[in-house]
Amino acid sequence: MRTKCLIIGSGPAGYTAAIYAGRANLQPVLIEGPQLGGQLMTTTEVENFPGYPDGVEPFQMMDDMKRQAERFGTTFVSGIVTKVNFQTTSNTGEARKPHQVWVEDTDLYEADAVIIATGASAKYLGIESERTYKGRGVSACATCDGFFYRKKTVAVVGGGDTACEEANYLAGLCEKVYMIVRKPYLRASEIMQQRVLNNPKIEVLFEHNTLRLTGETKVQGADLVYRKGEPDEELRHIAIDGFFLAIGHHPNTDLFKDFIARDAEGYILTDGVSTQCFKCGNAEMGKCENEKMEGVFAAGDCADPHYRQAIVAAGSGAKAAIEADKYIKSL
Ligand code: NDP
């Protein structure tokens, strides 16, 4: 299938890009990916997206965005992108080739412009009870879900800047915040550490690991182990209402690593305020040429290690579509 504009990802960035590209008459094709609606679907309610004064369920919000994109002529493809081939412009004057994207290894899509909006995935500990209580006390986003734990007791796992930031944020809402840190020290920057250590509502549990979460239908507690494997190993139970993971995110960008430049964490590098990607020219050597990649744009959390908010992702989706439109019109 040949299209002008292909969008990969169905979170706020992807759908917003589709709305803008559709209204620009690009007749976009959007590949929905493994998690329809993106990361937001793992939360319980969205209260901080403008336009929903009473809050909205994530499913409803993403369905609204999808219908809006559909109204302007987006074609949706359910499936997972398994391979891409981004064509770089040759110096030999031969005709420019379209970028190629394969869905489920078999279906080939060719496009003048590709917008990558594949998001990022929060890292989880990998214990079974995390899955049992997902959306019922387990969250990976304090800004999204902290409000539901006002005057309650919560735990934040992790000792980096994100964990400290989230613990401080939650301390402003909750009665008490435990930080569960596996090392005897925090990894976060000095200033973030001081904020946490000086906050009377936060208790840092150094050298603790989480064994399991407990509770009848929702999280009510956590079984921890102190100094696992040491002679003074000790089991401990804490009563909590919420369990927040802050042990890092992984951007879903591995698929593109041979073509576009990413930072050490895997976030796609873009050209300043623009969403245009850079080439990664010599894949074998892992070296990037630091030249712009024509017709490939990145939006949302796959290129954003800082904000990770639906509204920011939606904004960058709009930017990517405007830039894709400008690029296509220049051809
Ligand atoms: P980091 O990788 O910096 O920290 C992750 C934390 O989670 C570490 O304390 C790590 O422990 C812990 N951890 C990882 N895996 C596990 C596990 N399986 N069990 C228990 N604990 C675990 O990630 P962040 O998201 O905090 O930060 C990412 C980047 O973003 C950093 O560069 C950070 O500085 C930056 N950032 C900056 C902010 C700011 O400046 N305001 C705010 C937020 C992020 P261990 O230390 O033992 O490895």
Image (cartoon, grey):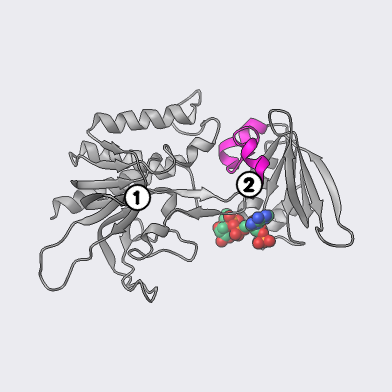
User: Which residue appears farthest toward the top when viewing the image?
Assistant: 54
Q: Residues within 10 Å of mark 2 (few under 14, many from 20)?
A: many
Q: Amino acid at mark 1?
A: Val
Instruction: Tell me the mark number nearer the camera, choosing from 2 and 1.
Output: 1
Pointer 2 or 1: first along the chain = 1
Q: Which of the numbered marks, if any, corresponds to residue 245?
A: 2
* 109 drawn magenta: no
Q: Position of residue 54 (x, y in %)?
A: 50, 23
Which secondary structure, mark 1?
Answer: strand
Quadrant in which residue 176 is drawn: top right
* 148 drawn magenta: yes
Q: CA distance from mark 2 to mark 1?
A: 28 Å
Where 174 falls versus 181 (above or below)? above
**Which residue is at a point 32% across and 28% down the rendered structure image?**
67
Q: Which residues are magenta?
A: 126-149
Q: Position of residue 91 (x, y in %)?
A: 15, 73
Q: Which of the numbered marks, if any, corresponds to residue 81?
A: 1
Q: Amino acid at mark 2?
A: Leu
Residue 51: tell me if it is visible: no
Q: Residues within 10 Å of mark 1 (few under 14, many from 20)?
A: many
In the image, 201 versus 281, the foreground residue is 281
Quadrant in which residue 191 is drawn: bottom right
The quarter of the rendering in which ligand 1 is drawn is bottom right
User: Relative to residue 185, is residue 44 drawn left or right?
Assistant: left
